[in-house]
Amino acid sequence: MIIRDLRVMRGPNYWSIRRHKLIWMVLDLEELEDRPTNLIEGFRARLESMFPSLYGHRCSVGKPGGFFERVDEGTWMGHVVEHLALEIQSLAGMDTGFGRTRGTGKKGEYNVVFSYVEEKVGEYAAKAAVDIARALVEGKSYNLDRDIQNMREIREEYRLGPSTGSIVDAAVARGIPWVRLNRHSLVQLGYGAYQQRIQATQTGKTSSVAVEIACDKEETKNLLENMGIPVPKGQIVRSLEGLEEAVGRLGYPLVTKPLDGNHGKGATTNLRNWEEAVTGFHAAKEYGRSVIVERFIKGYDHRLLVIDYKFVAAARRTPAMVVGNGNHTIRQLIDAVNHDPRRGYGHEKVLTQIKVDSYTLNILEDKGLTLDSVLPLGEGLPLKPTANISTGGTSEDVTDVVHPYNIFMAERIARIIGLDICGIDVMTPNISDPVVDNGGAVLEVNAAPGFRMHLEPATGLPRNVADPVIDMLFPPGSKSRIPIIAVTGTNGKTTTTRLMAHLVKTMGYKVGYTTTDGIYIQNRMMERGDCTGPWSAEFVLKDPTVNFAVLETARGGMLKSGLGFQNCDIAIVTNVAADHLGLKGINTLEDLAKVKAVLPESVFEHGYAILNADDDLVYDMRKNIKCNIGLFSLDEHNPRIEAHIKNNGLAAVAENGYVTIMKGSWKLRVNKVASIPLTFGGRAVFNIQNTLPCILAGFIQGFKVEDMRLALETFIPSPAQTPGRMNLFRFREFEVMIDYAHNPHGFRAIGEFLSKVDASPKVGIIAGVGDRRDEDIMELGQISAGMFDEIIIRQDKNLRGRTEEALIDLLKQGIGKVDGQKKLTIIPQERQAIDYAMKSAVKGSFIVICSDVVPDALNQIMAYKEAEEREVSGFV
């Protein structure tokens, strides 16, 4: 049993539109294909012994114990691996339950798909599940506890922290998209020009000056003291001599903490003698050169949270501690506390397990205790110097009992420091009394305060402290999304994308778009190459200068990772034709149509899916779509169009020499076909077809007809605007056209255009694509033989698993089926093939270069063109 491929889905995908977070692996069962579970002696017993909780898996039986019934009946190991991967994630504290296992079409090979909570944990679970299944089959022991702990540690390393996660959840609840910008806590909320950023609980609006002040404890204290806020007396020291001076001036008890620390790191409280003071000094020095020594204020530790300068929550915090019972040791008491089901590893539960660390051991040593000491009945023992939740402390919500003066003080402190999100630490005997009256004091002001104590207090009411952050970043009426138009299909999607982007730009938007040749921001290429996957889409959506996105979306990216966005406003599907079949389990046109359908199925309910009514597979996509539907056709009398507009639907058609919008009984003629350069005077029928969804999308977006007309007339097919898409070069005695056509449908479109071109001979430079099926490569040869008088066979740079000889032979077979006498030349290198065609071109000929490296071919032809122009002008 071996994993042949493993992919992480992060957006809407082939396996599920709504479950974005999926692991997809191709699992080869090898010899286990012939050994279903009922033929493996003792398998069921070993499985149930190791995973009794699998009883809860209903499987297709639909009842508890259903999966075990399937095991008894006999199911294949891919199915078992799916359930194991889900169960071990749940055992590690990440409940998830979606899974599918389907054959790939190859004997013994299965697509195993299951959901995950954390991506890296999902990948680990896939591999671990295979190892566990193998051990169960072989009857070998397996260390499951190690896997569970590893997954918990991976989750804590890669997950968003509870504070960041709560803000993201609040954003998602309001329909605001988000993108994680690094592996830590930097997150983008919203898209493009409307984005806001957070890092933990700091925002893009947080003042850097305020953060700097808050991180300087002494500066903070001076500011507050000067504004009448009660703070503990203290001073900054850098040496033991300075510490001695501070002790003499302030007296005991004391607190030591680093000058620029946060989250309680390096802080030690209630120091009552010189030895303890020295220990606290050295603990603080680990986090900075300067140490604050302050008078210890007696009372309870409280955190007041202020967001957007308004008080939102308060919590009373207690350090990790145990209470003696007169029988058990301190070690046993800690173990008992950690058995509280509310405590977990890291941030997985409301409370964190207590770990014995150097702080704990120092506290015990100072009190003359060890972990084996027994505390008297009822005696409490703090185990940490601070009340942080992340070190095992607890919190009690006290929001409703905070005295109005203390609320006023907290909001005023936030203004004094200038923090939009502010955590204020107050030590006071009673938060219900004014701090100025009961001897309390403000200890610290924290930038990026943790939310966990408020979201999940050990006692008291949980407080939704994330919503106020979203209210601040996205006030009512503000935008968080930019319009997204996404384009997919087998052919025409790049030209459609570029034309659509041109329309959008003409309307005054700052558009970002992706294509097979690169990523463009406001018509400037940012990245070169095939950029039609999710990473490229995110590139555009992360750009803060973009307020409109047009995204070419190819099958490869959808299969590899899913879409790079959850929803779009408009999806255009140009067509579905044979290409890439036999790859990644996509073996039929119906399979390919299902992949392409991911895009229209991801459209917002209020948005539009624009479908090709002339293509049966594309038209059938409407059955699973929940948004509005627009259709386009080259035939206004297409029965599908007539039925659609009769029901008040929108359509775009070619009629009487115009591209026209139709709805009900009315027509809105946008422009004459002959006036649209992209159509080459109407000869390039496929570009008429590419124009139709663009004008329909523009109409849906509210673009004015006269503006769209201008855009259509200024979109010139050229190396600049449509590189590799019917780029025509007129030389003195012949013409050359470069096109990216690489599949049968694209070749037929070129053939239809050539049939309207008055030229002879027509010469084609073609190649086979190595990762296509034999029949697809042969079909390219057949089509070429029908449209070219002469054929030059070259080879792609990347042969994709085949040899030159094999590709050439398949093309020759296809050509031979149509015309065994066709003039044929074989020149493997594309550059040499182009040189041969150019140098041997006769008057009146028309050369078509079907190129896979379009920039190189364009540069080569433009060099010939420049040389001819120099010769004509007399400059050599």
Image (spheres, rainbow, N blue to C red):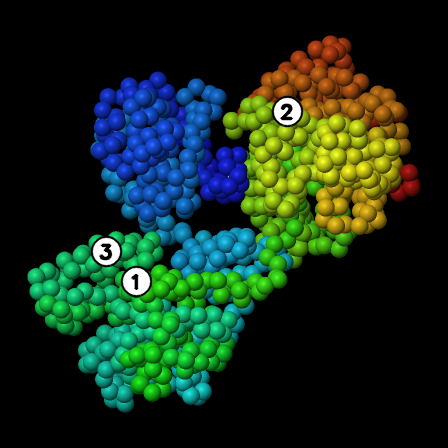
Quarter of the image for residue 802 reads top right
* C-alpha separation, residue under disc 2 versus residue under disc 3: 59 Å
Circle 3 is placed at which residue position?
A: 340
Residue 860 numbered tag: none
Circle 2 is placed at which residue position?
A: 578
Circle 1 is placed at which residue position?
A: 458
Quarter of the image for residue 833 reads top right
Q: Residue at x 75, y 55 (%)?
A: 508
Residue 844, horizontal then vertical, whole percent? 88, 25
* C-alpha separation, residue under disc 3 versus residue under disc 1: 11 Å
Q: Nearer the viewer, mark 2 or mark 1?
A: 1
Q: Amino acid at mark 1?
A: Ala
Residue 106, horizontal then vertical, whole percent? 46, 21
Q: Residues within 10 Å of mark 1 (few under 14, many from 20)?
A: some
> Which residue is nearer to you in this view: 201 or 48?
48
**Cβ–Cβ below 8 Å for labels 3 and 1?**
no
Q: Of marks 2 and 3, which one's residue comes earlier in the chain?
A: 3
Q: Amino acid at mark 3?
A: Asp
